Amino acid sequence: MYMSYTSSITGKSRDFNSVAELLAKANEEKTGDQLAEIAASSEAERVAAKDALSRLPLETLRDSPAVPDDDEVTRVIQDAVDETVYDRIRDWTVADLREFLLDDRTREPDIDQIRPGLTSEMVAAVAKIMSNLDLIQATSKMQVTARCNNTIGTEGTLSFRLQPNDPADDIENIRHSIREGLSYGVGDAVIGLNPVEDTAEQTKRLLEVTKEFIETWDIPTQNCVLSHLTTQLKAVENGAPADLLFQSLAGTEAGNESFGIDVDLLDEAYKFGQQHCTASGPNVMYFETGQGSELSADAHAGIDQVTLEARCYGLAKRYDPFLVNTVVGFIGPEYLYDGKQVIRAGLEDVFMGQLTGISMGIDACYTNHIQADQNDIENLAVLLTAAGTNYFITVPMGDDTMLNYQSNSYHDAAALWDVFDLRPAPEFEEWLEEMGIMQDGRLTAHAGDPTHFLERADE
């Protein structure tokens, strides 16, 4: 049935012909939406779309999924809805949901009560009518914890992935990078490595190297090698010690097909991981996402990138992941043009992930052809630490020489912990204290000295 949505807030009546059009034009400016030719043509049209979207009942969003029900991501999202909870909130408007989230009286237990009744389109819609500060305030109320070999997301903590990538997969260079990262106190989220060579043999080799290091030093963390999911499954079948299984996700079935995955494979991997991953668990899955990935694969179905990103989180939730992160500025300026767009996307993504109910983090990053710099990424890190993200990705000196992009550095962790009076995951902090790297929540004189591990190894 055809239906239009109208706003006259700008003094001119504007009609939007579908929920999908309304969602797209209510977005903050993103070059990806412009490339897809679905963006608002002016700020006035954007404001009008936000107005009309704010008055939309949640029921309308439930009945009008961004991608039809023949898409398996849509079916996963729709099937996961708790109908009893949904019935309590179906008459809320998007504005009502925003007011609920920002109300001074609303806290995590209140938010957790409505999560099961939300769809990804509802989550995306409310993000679109929020300012950056709204997103920070609402996210700061949400606490989502998960456990693998340690516990992430507990109150007063901020965790970090240690990413020891090497352009040649050189084992000793990787070990050196792990030593350096640990000496700065990072690595409690995961020691996660992107391999140069995506083979089961190389994946097994790198998993063995990282697991050996973890076991030698009795580190309460988890390892992961971010090869393709099917490659990891083969490696583990051949005896590789993986604590987490990784995969990139998209918000449409076609987008996931471009990644070489589908829901059946993810279901199989989830069950396999619960039986064969070396972690104590129960959370053994790790997913990465990023606004614009569906458009880059010509699999966006005419839907805006924020809504598609929210759908990634709806799919991820099915697998109770330990970690999910958005690689926010990695894909390129065709999707997020500059630092302003990257910052907005990072705030949106962590908010949407946490509202979905997954353990959410971020790779606050940029590539050299985007109009951003290290100050933009550090600004985003400060904003998201204030918002309460679970973790960040960190690389040596903020420069990943294998993937050729810039991110947060190992030593950024100390500054963020200090400014916001935060600490690593509890089990990891205890280990850092035993190692003499941290004391009373602050790094010691050994911080940043990777030879500390060599000295201890010689004792």
Image: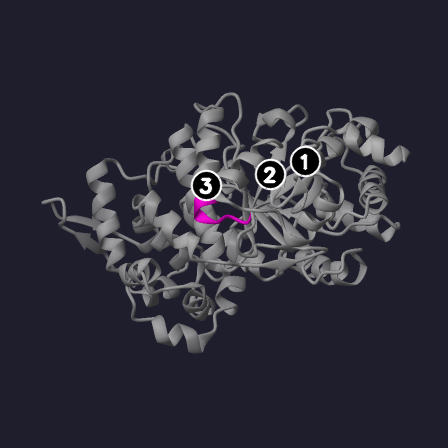
Looking at the picture, how far across and down is residue 3, in whole percent? 25, 60
The front one of 30 and 136 is: 136
Amino acid type, mark 1 = Gln
Q: Is residue 337 visible?
A: no
Q: Classify residue 248 as left or right of residue 73.
A: right
Taking the spot 27% from the left edge, 54% from the top edge, the residue there is 53
Amino acid type, mark 3 = Gly
* Contact? badges 2 and 1 (CB < 8 Å): yes
- The first of marks 3 and 1 along the sequence is 1
**Residue for badge 1:** 163
**Looking at the picture, does residue 456 appear above or below residue 150?**
above
Q: Which dot, 3 or 2, sits closer to the camera? A: 2
**Residue for badge 3:** 346
Q: Is residue 389 magenta?
A: yes
- Label 3 CA crowd tier, 10 Å (few <14, some 14–19, many 20+): many
Q: Does the magenta stretch include residue 171?
A: no
Q: What stretch is highlighted in magenta?
A: 385-390
Q: Is mark 1 on a helix, strand or loop?
A: loop
> Gap between marks 3 and 2, in whole Å?
13 Å
Outermost residue on the bottom side: it is 84
- On residue 393, the disc is 2
Looking at the picture, how far across and down is residue 33, in whole percent? 38, 38
- Label 2 CA crowd tier, 10 Å (few <14, some 14–19, many 20+): many
Q: What element carries label 3?
A: helix
Looking at the picture, how far across and down is residue 274, in whole percent? 74, 62
